[in-house]
Each structure stands twice: as structure tokens, then as C-alpha cells.
């Protein structure tokens, strides 16, 4: 098994790698990334990875956008969110956007082991003491929007992110090394799937994936 730990804190990353090695066994390959950029590079080299431990507040993850882009691009890889944030609404949102588990950074080794075992078995996991609070928590993102996001292809999701960043079609075409007409087709499909009538509104919706300032 190949697992990737994406966290920008070196000491925590090393500690999580050591703990995960004990849980997954000596045959498991544990790779480390300190940014989303490094994580994407590792996934290109190891598309057969099965687990990703993803820090919610990784600097270039843009909140839930990092999780959503990974889910879109690599739907078969289980993603375990790891965060110091233990707010039930945040946990609920991570699970609704496709995380397989949400592990507080304060969790002891036995809980980490329990979470990994559940995920490897195809289940989802959150700390037992938070389950009820998570179920009752408010939605940070409109669930209709979350369902619509799931309809986007990986290419369309990348285009949407660049729309939110303010890029024009010709700039997006340059970044993706395709014809501008292809980008126009993607934009039309994005607007239709998100049920909005212009790219500005689509960009505003994407911004909702970023973690609110209160966290």
C-alpha cells in the first residue's frame, strides 16, 4: 500500500508517518508532501496510492477546495482529513465533500489506528464522541451546490478554479495547453451544471469552498 501524508508541519508529518507505518505495516510505503503542489506531483508519480492524510489548513489547499479537487481527480483514493480544528460543522462539511475520515491532531495512536482500519475497510470515521454533534451541525456549504460540484469532470473543476482566480478563457487555455474553444465548451458545461448564468457567479460559488475566516 502507498499512503501520502500532506502537512506543512515537519514534526507532525514525521510523527504521523511513524504512527501510520506501525498501523499499516512495514510493507506500506509512506510518502510525504508539505504542500498541495508537492502532493499533486507525488500523485502523478504514484497514481496507485490508496490513502492520503490531508491537512485541512495546508497553505495552498484553499480550505475544502483541495479536498474537492482531489476527490474529483482521484475518486478511488481514500482521503483522511487531519486537522487541529474540531468544529462539528467543519467535520460535517469534510465528510459531505468526500473525506473518508476526519482525525483531530490531538487524537491518540489508538484512535488513529481505528480510523485507518475503518477507512481501509471502506467505512467512514469520526471520533465517537463527536458523531452526534456532527450530525446536528449546520451546513457550511449549500448541499445542492455540493451535489452539483460532483457532476464536474476533473478538467471542468480546474477551469472553475481558474475562473475563480480571475483568469480569462485565453489564459486558462494557455495554462491547460488547449484551444480557447475547448475552454469555452468547459465554461458552458460548468455554468449549466452549477445552474448559474455567468462565470462571475460560478467563481463566487467556488469561493465558498474556502474555509471561513472564523476557523
Image (tube, rainbow, N blue to C red):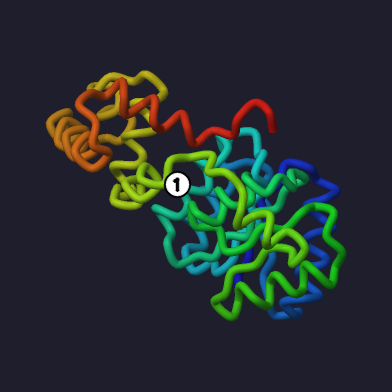
Quadrant into which the N terminus falls:
bottom right
Q: Relative to residue 129, is residue 200 depicted above or below? A: above
Query: Percent from the top left, x then y, of residue 86?
Result: 74, 48
Q: Nearer the viewer, residue 100 or 134?
A: 134
Q: Is residue 162 left or right of residue 44?
A: left
Q: Nearer the viewer, residue 130 or 106?
A: 130
Location of mark 1 (residue)? 69
**In the figure, 168 relative to 185: above or below?**
above
Q: Does dot 1 land on a helix, a strand or a loop? A: helix
* Left/right of residue 173 with respect to residue 24 in the rendered view: left
Q: Residues within 10 Å of mark 1 (few under 14, many from 20)?
A: some
Position of residue 92 relative to residue 124, above or below, is above
Residue 195, percent from left and from top:
23, 36
Residue at (37, 28) in percent of width and height: 162
Identify whether 82 is placed above or below 2. above
How many numbered circles does the render carry?
A: 1
Q: Residue at x 61, y 72 (%)?
A: 119
Q: Nearer the viewer, residue 111 or 55?
A: 111
Q: Nearer the viewer, residue 78 or 171?
A: 78
Q: Quadrant of the C terminus?
A: top right
Task: Please tell me which residue is depicted at 77% across the width and 73% down the height of the picture.
Answer: 113
The quarter holding residue 168 reads: top left
Q: Position of residue 178 (x, y in %)?
A: 22, 36
Name which quarter of the figure residue 121 lies in: bottom right
Tell me where residue 71 appears, x and y as whole percent. Answer: 45, 55
Instruction: Look at 37% across and 19% down and name the residue there.
Output: 166
Amino acid at each position: 500500500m502507498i499512503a501520502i501524508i500532506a502537512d506543512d508541519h515537519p514534526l507532525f508529518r514525521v510523527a504521523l508517518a511513524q504512527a501510520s507505518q506501525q498501523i499499516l505495516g512495514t510493507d506500506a510505503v509512506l510518502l510525504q508532501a508539505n504542500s498541495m503542489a508537492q502532493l499533486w506531483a507525488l500523485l502523478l508519480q504514484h497514481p496507485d496510492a490508496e490513502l492520503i492524510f490531508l491537512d485541512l489548513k495546508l497553505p495552498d489547499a484553499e480550505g475544502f477546495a483541495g479536498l474537492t479537487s482531489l476527490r474529483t481527480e482521484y475518486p478511488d483514493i481514500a482521503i483522511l482529513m487531519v486537522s487541529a480544528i474540531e468544529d462539528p460543522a467543519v467535520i460535517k462539511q469534510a465528510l459531505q465533500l468526500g473525506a473518508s475520515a476526519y482525525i483531530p491532531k490531538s487524537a491518540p495512536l489508538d484512535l488513529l489506528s481505528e480510523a485507518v482500519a475503518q477507512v481501509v475497510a471502506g467505512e467512514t470515521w469520526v471520533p465517537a464522541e463527536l458523531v452526534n454533534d456532527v450530525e446536528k451541525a449546520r451546513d457550511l456549504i449549500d448541499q445542492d451546490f455540493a451535489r452539483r460540484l460532483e457532476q464536474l469532470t476533473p478538467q471542468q473543476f480546474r477551469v472553475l478554479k481558474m475562473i475563480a482566480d480571475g483568469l480569462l478563457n485565453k489564459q486558462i487555455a494557455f495554462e491547460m495547453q488547449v484551444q480557447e474553444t475547448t475552454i469555452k465548451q468547459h465554461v458552458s458545461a460548468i455554468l449549466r451544471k452549477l445552474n448559474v448564468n455567468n462565470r462571475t457567479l460560478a467563481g463566487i460559488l467556488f469561493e465558498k469552498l474556502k474555509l471561513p475566516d472564523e476557523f
